[in-house]
Amino acid sequence: MRFKLLLNTFLKVFLPLILGCLLLWFLYRKMDFAEIWNVISRGVRYDIILFSLLFGLGANIVRGWRWGLLIDTLGQRYRMKNLIYAVLGNYAINFLLPRVGEVWRCGIITKYEKISFPKLIGTLLIDRVTDTLSVGLITLCIFAFNFGFFRNFFARNPELMITFPDNGSILWLLSGFLIIALAVWFAFVRLGSFHVVQKARGLLSNVWQGVKSLWLMERKWLFLLQTLAIWTLYYFYFYITFYAFDFTRELGPGVGLVAFAMGSIGVAVPIQGGIGPWHFMVIASLMCFGVKETDAAAFALVVHTTQSIWTALCGIFGIAALPLTNRGASHN
């Protein structure tokens, strides 16, 4: 049991971090650190960097409001400050355990607001899917209006080109999905009297109620507006930092949107804080627009480090505020 726990901890915590750090080392191993340090120490307007952090905090506060819209459809009462603190804490937890913060977020709201955990997981799925679609739409727009960037990006990084599977591999993959689907159907239809199947049915039913929250929502327009606000704030959170460096100041909002979208794709990799993948995507994107490699590397280090520290501090505040805010409340 002890070995299994250690192995599980290694796979969830240390392996992603090691892979991210290895990618970071690979990116920076041949660069001139004296030149990078010269930019970091003398070529950055840190007052602008600090100002940009307010937009990241604003985006996460709006995310808490948007989550409340989904929970409203469950007919449950809640305190909005608990949702906001949970969202902030979510990101701090993710720095330790990638993607575990989302589960923690639902668990802490179940604890303090007595809302069904599976139903909250359902609303969280909508939250995550909406974000994935948002990044996809941004990337699609960039692809449509700036195809030359992607051609240049993949020409510079041919190792990222997708290798499509052959027909035989696709057939085996589809067969595997079909077998799994039939096995699940058989278990739920033919073995419905078993306790474990009944528990699984109940769990999935609660999750589905949470997933349906978007369709049941009365103020869908507000959900869309808040989604737009979240990603606009995230964009400014990133783009304002362009004005802190001489070599990005004149690139313009279009280039900022491209680098922002590519960085968002990098963050999707389940590594703490996107360490490594985010740096690679942003550095490679900036280089496509003529930024020198060491300058792009300095930009990535400064922006990612300051944003990570800020996210962790806000998250720690959220985690600490939850028990203080709910002191005296009944949790039985």
Image (tube, grey):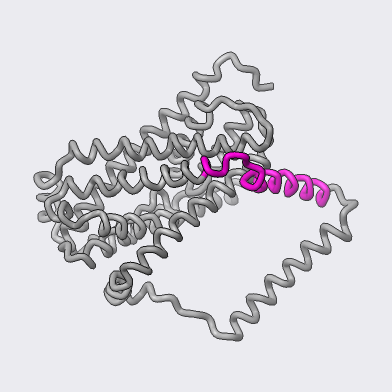
- Against 230, is 320 above or below? above
Q: Quadrant of residue 234?
A: top left
Give the residue displayed 50% in from the left and 34% down from the top: 65
The percent position of residue 163, horizontal first and vertical second, equals 45, 79
Q: Residue at x 41, y 28 (%)?
A: 317
Q: Position of residue 84 (x, y in %)?
A: 48, 31
Quadrant of residue 267 within the rendered picture: bottom left
Percent across and percent down for residue 126 are 58, 48
Residue 248 in view of the camera: yes
On the rendered structure, is 259 left or right of 222? left
Looking at the image, is 117 positioned above or below residue 140? above
x%, y% of residue 19?
39, 59
Region in magenta: 196-223
* Location of the C terminus (image quadrant): top right
Counting every numbered tag in the picture gives 0
Task: State the residue lying farthest toward the top.
Answer: 328
Helix, strand or loop: magenta stretch: helix
Q: Residue at x 24, y 36 (%)?
A: 50
**Going 21% across and 52% down the picture, which residue do you hit?**
299
Magenta span includes 150:
no
Foreground: 89 or 126?
126
In the visual, does 126 lie left or right of 200? left
Kindly tell me whether residue 18 is visible in this rendering: no
